[in-house]
Image (tube, grey):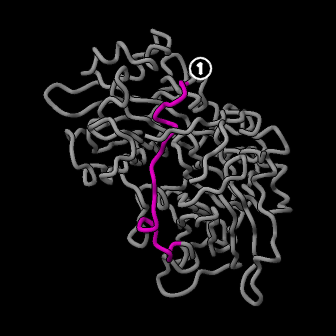
Amino acid sequence: MKTTLLRPRDWNSQPRQAHSDYKSTLRRSQSQPLVSLPPGSGEHVGPLFGPHDALAAHADLTRNASASGEAIGERIIVAGRVLEEDGRPLRDALVEVWQANAAGRYAHERDQHDAPLDPNFLGAGHVLTDSEGRYRFTTIRPGAYPWRNHANAWRPAHIHFSVFGRAFAQRLVTQMYFPGDPLLPLDPIYNATADEAARVRLVAGFSQRLTEPEWALGYTFDIVLRGSAATPMED
Amino acid sequence: MRGQTPSQTIGPFFSHALTAGTTAYRPLVCSDLTDEALEGKPIRLEGRVVDGDGKAVSDGMVEIWQANAGGKYRPDSGFRGFGRSGTDASGRFRFETVKPGPAAPDAAPHVHLAVFARGMLNHAFTRMYFSDESEANRTDPVLGSVPADRRETLVAQRRDGEAVYDFEIVLQGKRETVFFDA
């Protein structure tokens, strides 16, 4: 077994677990201190995925689950790299995404927001990174939607990301936001990360380079996982 | 050095993408690991996730990661050792897998878990040990590093006469499950 000695989770870059502005944390956040694990623990190795696991069609959410045509909304391209802290790209990293549709509604039975569903948009996809750690999705820009956390609460538009590194301990579930969204300063989930320099890493950048003429706007979003504590060996 | 990307909650609306899927979309992983296991004793892990008030967490997700029956992670055989289950209306999750072997001479067999839910800004790592491995559990270095009065929260209880282990994950409070800074 090849285990990696990982750098610790940087708690300054991570949200606090109990954040009173986000009501659901009150009974679901941990109240006891976390227990440290010794180096070489099984958490420091993780499941592997390969090209045979992923269907290329699922990188295009405007078509991958459509009933009879293309999804409605502003078509966008979201692309970036999955890296470790030292810049090392992660190859064959599984990236899963899910999101609301253009009207701000999820294709989920418990989402009761009074906004239309789109029969041609499920809002779920996945892709594996290439040898340089790159991923790329085509999708629809999600709409903002109300939630019941506080009076007149609205989530800023976001895309959920689930990412696997080389180790189970590198597992990351996060959300990508859009630049300039006026709801960001008001959102308790986004603001649960106290450190502003860390928080802004959740905001994608507009990219003219990724933008395709007459087709779709492009956004870049790099994802940085905990890296190796020692100098990595070349594979 | 680049800064780590912050974690954010999984939210309440992920099952169509990550666990249950739909007719048009199947997630890449599921809660049954037995198809890919070439050796080992099939077991079922059943559990429940509850919050600080003891209420069922009905919109959570649990992932497991484990060695194969021979105690190897990522063996060449194709046993990925990874599974995922949503929680149902009673907070219950379930995995079909094989019992892992000990990964080191002094280690007791165990399964790694990650728990995700609305209201959890970071997911929580824990471990599940087995009640019918009490001898090995006594010498396991990680179990030994946990305060004695909380150790039981990491031990799944085997049902009489069945290869089924019950495990409760308590997110908060006096009975809180031990979580690790993995």
A138 relative to A86 in the view: left or right: left
Residue at position x 35%, y 39% in the image: B72
Residue at position x 42%, y 48% in the image: B86
B145 relative to B32 in the view: left or right: right
Query: Residue B169 at x, y = what percent?
Result: 44, 30
Q: Quadrant of the image for the N terminus of chain A?
A: top left
* Amino acid on which disc 1 is placed: Gln
Q: Chain of mark 1?
A: A
| Residue nearer the viewer, A225 or B153 | A225
* Magenta extent: A37-58
Is residue B52 positioned above or below A127 on the image?
Answer: above
Q: Quadrant of the image for the C terminus of chain A?
A: bottom right
A212 relative to B78 in the view: left or right: right
**Secondary structure found at label 1:** loop
Q: Can residue B55 be seen here?
A: no
What residue is pinned by disc 1? A32
Which residue is outermost to the top? Answer: B148
Asked if residue A81 is among those painted magenta in the image, a careful observer would answer: no
Quarter holding residue B69: top left
Query: Residue B137 at x, y = what percent?
Result: 34, 17
Residue at position x 27%, y 21% in the image: B133
| Residue nearer the viewer, A103 or B64 | B64
Is residue A82 positioned above or below B26 on the image?
Answer: above
